[in-house]
Image: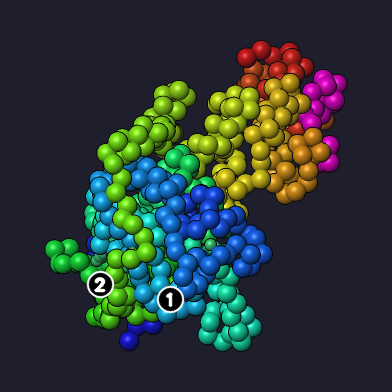
Amino acid sequence: MTTAHDTIAFADALKEFEPVIGLETHVELGTNSKMFCSCPTAFGAESNTQVCPVCLGLPGSMPVVNRAAVESTIRMGLALNCDIASWCRFARKNYFYPDMPKDYQVSQYDEPLCTDGYLDVTVETDAGPREFRVEIERVHMEEDTGKLTHAGGATGRIHGADYSLVDYNRAGIPLIEIVTKPLVGTGELAPQVAKAYVTELRDLMRALGVSDVRMEEGSLRCDVNVSLNRPGDPWGTRSETKNVNSLRSVERAVHSEIERQAAVLSSGGRVVQETRHFHEDTGRSTSGRSKEQAEDYRYFPEPDLVPVAPSTEWVDELRGTLPELPSARRARLRAEWGVGEHEFQTMVNAGALELIEASIAEGVDPAAARKWWTGELLRIANDREMELADVPVTPAQIRRVESLVADGSLNDKLARQVFDGVISGEGDVDEVVAGRGLAVVSDDSSLLAAIDTALAEQPDVADKIRGGKVQAAGAIVGAVMKATRGQADAAKVRALLLERLGVSE
Ligand code: ADP
Ligand code: MG
Ligand code: ZN
């Protein structure tokens, strides 16, 4: 009997099994009003203040389709290389649960608006970047459900709760769901491909302006499907990890599910078709609801809404509104910045492109912008397990640090300490410099004093240098750097030292 804790190490799992992955991504569109009524969609309003008879499902109310939501969906479909249906309908998905006061959700079922597309994504491997084509099954429109809050229990789940609260502000907000076809052949790169795909989708939606995709507000949620099979065998049974809501978690969810399923299968067990819940704290998922018996949602065409029948002219017009897409933009930036494929991919993977672009726009030298975002700031982000974009350093602060480096007040080592201070909340750049007493020691007399002290402490080294062994100078320079806590310019110390001893290179 295997338990939820039994896993096989990832690398071993991949020796025995091949993964198949599939992603269902829900994104809240950034329309001003809801999908079928004119209620506002702003996030964070007091509960149940953005509701009306339509989204509350009161008898006699009639829905009307939000044109902006249809436009956004078509533009997204076009950007994903999909076919756009010339005629399609909404469907009612019937279920009884208090997150939807109508007892059904309006969605699209067998007549999605967009079908059969693809999105190419690139992941970095030891052997260089590798591209994968993720095929898209469908992009359809639906409405979001309300939000339930289970109170009084320890876990925030319904089990153990004393009571539950419902907030219908979110009910009826336009969503698009983007469903991939099963993706095979990713092997050990499956977790990275999944993350790269969701990242690319997010960037695409931002570029199109159809959603601002704030993952921390839950405006993009991913269901992560994974199955394993032995090479040559048919696909295995999939599990579906629900509502994974950060890019990093998408990667971790695939990773941990491969380890879990491999353990089940190699001990002779059977993977149960079920939904699973991902836990951010442990990076693992636990069993949710079984899907062995397909739920019957009794879908039928929504009788209160007219079909959506976009004309060829309208679709063409929308095609004309597509902006430069992220892949084209990347190609352009790489050419503009003149960097190699590998270096560029490092910036992409770090999520640094926009940050570098913004820094350059702020006046930072392009090479310096790249260096900071893919060097020190990335290291800090990784250390603190956060996305690079969430590191609290602004392009203006980078520009300020760079200007202090340029006029010789800071060196790179001190600049790193400045960023550490900024990120630790010690204030703006100049405040950290003042607060930590960071400044390059450039006045010759204090450097010469430090050099003399070091020479006196290491007379044998001093003799060697005098005797022409210039390589030995490193020991003295090192001692001076240490004595000045890194606040000296090493090249300058070296020059002063050689001059002091009357030696030339
Ligand atoms: P459901 O509503 O049951 O979640 P969908 O058709 O909406 O079904 O989505 C199923 C998702 O699972 C799709 O992304 C699909 O590509 C993926 N999928 C289907 N079969 C497998 C499999 N054997 N392994 C992994 N993913 C799969
Ligand atoms: Mg699903
Ligand atoms: Zn409403």
- Position of 266 relative to 199 (above/below): below
Q: Residue 168, percent across and down?
A: 56, 68
Check residue 448 for magenta coloring.
yes
Magenta residues span: 434-451
Q: Quadrant of the C terminus?
A: top right
Residue at image coords 39%, 77%: 95
- Marking on residue 103: 1
Question: Residue at (59%, 27%) from the top-left corner?
Answer: 361
Residue 256: quadrant of the picture? bottom left
Verify whether residue 157 appears in magenta: no
Under mark 1, the amino acid is: Asp
Placement of 9 over or under 81, stated as above or below: below
Residue at the disc numbered 2:
237
When asked about the image quadrant of residue 480, the answer is: top right
For the residues labelled 1 and 2, the Cα–Cα distance comes to: 30 Å
Q: Residue at x 42, y 55 (%)?
A: 65
Residue depth check, mark 1 versus mark 2: number of the one nearer the observer: 1
Secondary structure at badge 1 equals loop
Pointers 1 and 2 in contact (CB under 8 A)? no
Specify whether residue 372 is in view.
yes
Place residue 360 in its image quadrant: top right
Q: Does label 1 point to a residue whose CB lies under 8 Å from ligand 3?
A: no
Taking 207 as reference, is 312 left or right? left
Image vertical order of residue 200 relative to residue 22, above or below = above
Instruction: Residue 79: give x, y in percent of width and height.
Output: 34, 41
Please state the horizontal and vertical placement of residue 393, each as a whole percent of the image.
66, 41
Mark 2 Cβ inside 8 Å of ligand 1? yes
Q: Residue at x 69, y 14 (%)?
A: 503
Q: Position of residue 10 (x, y in %)?
A: 35, 64
N-terminal label among 1 and 2: 1
